[in-house]
Image: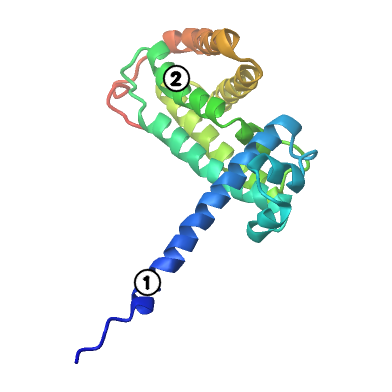
Amino acid sequence: MPEAPDTEEQAGPAQPRRRQARGERRIAQLLEAAAGVFCRSGYTAASTNAIAREAGVSPGTLYQFFPNKEAIAVELGGRLMQRWRETHGAAFDAIDPSLPLDELLDSVLDPLIEFNCENPAFAVLMHGSEIPGRITEEHDAVHSALLERVERILGDFLPDAAPAELSRIANMTFSSVKGGLELILAHEGTERDAYKVELKTMVQRYLGPLVDAAPEPADARTHTP
């Protein structure tokens, strides 16, 4: 007589996968709750009890996945940072130097503005003396890399600019966008839309005269950053 299949052995591999899937859903639930609490209360005033309440679970359930608030912030910050990299990378990779300046700015700024509006916790976790160092260090490293990339892109449009001048222009542009994003996030609805327009107008009016006055290099329309 053939042996009956071992049902427990067959179900064995599926059970850990189901537990893992449930765990991932719970982690996502807790991180979403943490994002809401961080945005309303700030990182320093937030607590694990508040995050558990927001998620609709007990503090004991939260502690099954995260030992403290810092661990939650590090996990949330890491996931947001990865999305941020992908968004910024996609925005810069999509740059078409043959576009007029206003259209080029749209292609870069629109996805960055959209990301920050969809992920307000990102701004909360990237700034402040109480934020876990791992988050801010990673943000600073990516920030520096992006600033260098902005400087290289501007160099294509301002070929005669001295290195120090190009650095100043890149820093002013980058800082203006950063400040504009803070204002955009501080408003909602039609007022938020108005600030989006103001940010683009400000950057356009700053860079436009510089780009218009610069000589056009022979390979300016063929070089891809």
- Considering only vertical position in the picture, is 221 above or below 224? above
Q: Mark 2 belongs to which amino acid?
A: Leu
Q: Which residue is mark 2?
A: 158
| CB atoms of marks 2 and 1 within 8 Å | no
Residue 121: x %, y % from top left: 63, 34
Residue 42: x %, y % from top left: 74, 34
Q: Is residue 7 visible?
A: yes
- Considering only vertical position in the picture, is 58 above or below 212? below
Q: Using the image as rendered, state which of residue 119 and residue 199 is in the foreground.
A: 119
Quarter of the picture containing the C terminus is top left
Q: Would residue 11 appear left or right of 33 to someone viewing this image? A: left
Q: Using the image as rendered, state which of residue 159 and residue 136 is in the foreground.
A: 136
Quarter of the picture containing the N terminus is bottom left
Q: Residue sitting at 42 percent across and 17 percent down?
A: 106
- Considering only vertical position in the picture, is 56 above or below 111? below
Q: Which residue is mark 1?
A: 11
Q: Would residue 1 appear left or right of 192 to someone viewing this image? A: left
Residue lying furthest bottom in this view? Answer: 1
Q: Using the image as rendered, state which of residue 201 and residue 122 is in the foreground.
A: 122
- Mark 2 burial class by Cα count in 10 Å: few <14, some 14-19, many 20+: many
The image quarter in which residue 180 lies: top right
Q: Is residue 77 visible?
A: no
Q: Which mark is residue 129?
A: none
The colour mode here is: rainbow
- Mark 1 burial class by Cα count in 10 Å: few <14, some 14-19, many 20+: few
Q: Mark 1 belongs to which amino acid?
A: Ala
Residue 137: x %, y % from top left: 65, 46
The image quarter in which residue 152 lies: top left
Residue 20: x %, y % from top left: 48, 61
Q: Residue sitting at 66 percent across and 50 percent down?
A: 72
Q: Nearer the viewer, mark 2 or mark 1?
A: 1
